[in-house]
Each structure stands twice: as C-alpha cells, then as structure tokens.
Image (cartoon, rainbow, N blue to C red):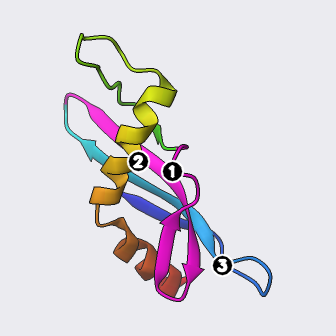
Amino acid sequence: MSTRVTHPGSAHNPPCGQTIWAECTLEQEAGVAWDWVQICDGVIAMADPMSVVTNLRLVGERGQVLTAREAALYLSRLVQQLPWQDEVLNALHVA
C-alpha cells in the first residue's frame, strides 16, 4: 500500500522508514505496518521484528485472541513472506 522514507540517510545514520501492507475491500480493511532500516547497499531489514503494528486480531488454537506479545512472532513471519524489500529499494531510489 505504502512505503515512506522517513530519513534518507547520512554518514552516521542509515536510511530508514515505514511500510504499510494492506488489503481494502468494501466491507473491511486489514493492514500491517513496520519500520525498516537499510543495513547496507541493497539490504533492507525490519528495524524491530517485535514491533509490527496491525488491526488484525490473531486467534490461538482454542479461539482466544493472542496478546500482542504472543502475536508478534506470527506477524514478523508474515512480514518476512511479503515482497516488501523491493518496494523499499524503489522508494529509496526515488528519495
């Protein structure tokens, strides 16, 4: 949905920003967002895999809503399966 470069980088601080991945329909919207940082040329990583923000509610095996801490592992895995790094690299080239 959106990738934003919040800091284009400097000699002491690498480029960083935020990406939002979402699905919007007439009935509902679902999304996840996370901060990222450029580790080196062409290598982008999540800034903090434990800090994915979402409006999703993940449910455990017994139907209970997972706490933010319990859901963090699943959300981090979800983000790693998305092709978001290419979008970040495109945004960095524009910035």
Secondary structure type for disc 1: loop
The answer to whether residue 14 is left or right of residue 93 is: right
In the rendered image, the quadrant that contains the C terminus is: bottom right
Instruction: Assess disc 3: are there few (<14), some (14-19) or many (≥20) residues with their C-alpha within 10 Å of its C-alpha.
Output: some
The residue carrying mark 2 is: 76
Which residues make up the magenta segment? 27-51
Looking at the image, residue 74 lies above or below residue 87: above
Q: Position of residue 16 (x, y in %)?
A: 61, 69
Instruction: Assess disc 2: are there few (<14), some (14-19) or many (≥20) residues with their C-alpha within 10 Å of its C-alpha.
Output: some
Question: In this rendering, does residue 91 appear at all?
Answer: no
Q: Position of residue 7 (x, y in %)?
A: 68, 71
Is residue 46 on the magenta stretch?
yes
Quote the CA–CA distance across marks 1 and 3.
Answer: 21 Å
The residue carrying mark 1 is: 49
Identify the mark nearer the N-term, 3 or 2.
3
User: Residue at (29%, 66%) from the top-left corner?
Assistant: 83
Secondary structure that dominates the magenta span: strand
Looking at the image, residue 70 lies above or below residue 42: above
Question: In this rendering, does residue 24 appear at all?
Answer: yes
Of marks 1 and 3, the one in the foreground: 1
Secondary structure type for disc 3: loop
The residue carrying mark 3 is: 8
Secondary structure type for disc 2: helix
**Which residue ends up furthest to the left in the rendered image?**
26
Amino acid identity at mark 1? Pro
State the image quarter where residue 63 is shown. top left
In the rendered image, the quadrant that contains the N terminus is: bottom left
Instruction: Assess disc 1: are there few (<14), some (14-19) or many (≥20) residues with their C-alpha within 10 Å of its C-alpha.
Output: some
State the image quarter where residue 62 is shown. top left
Q: Position of residue 4 (x, y in %)?
A: 53, 65
The answer to whether residue 25 is left or right of residue 67 is: left
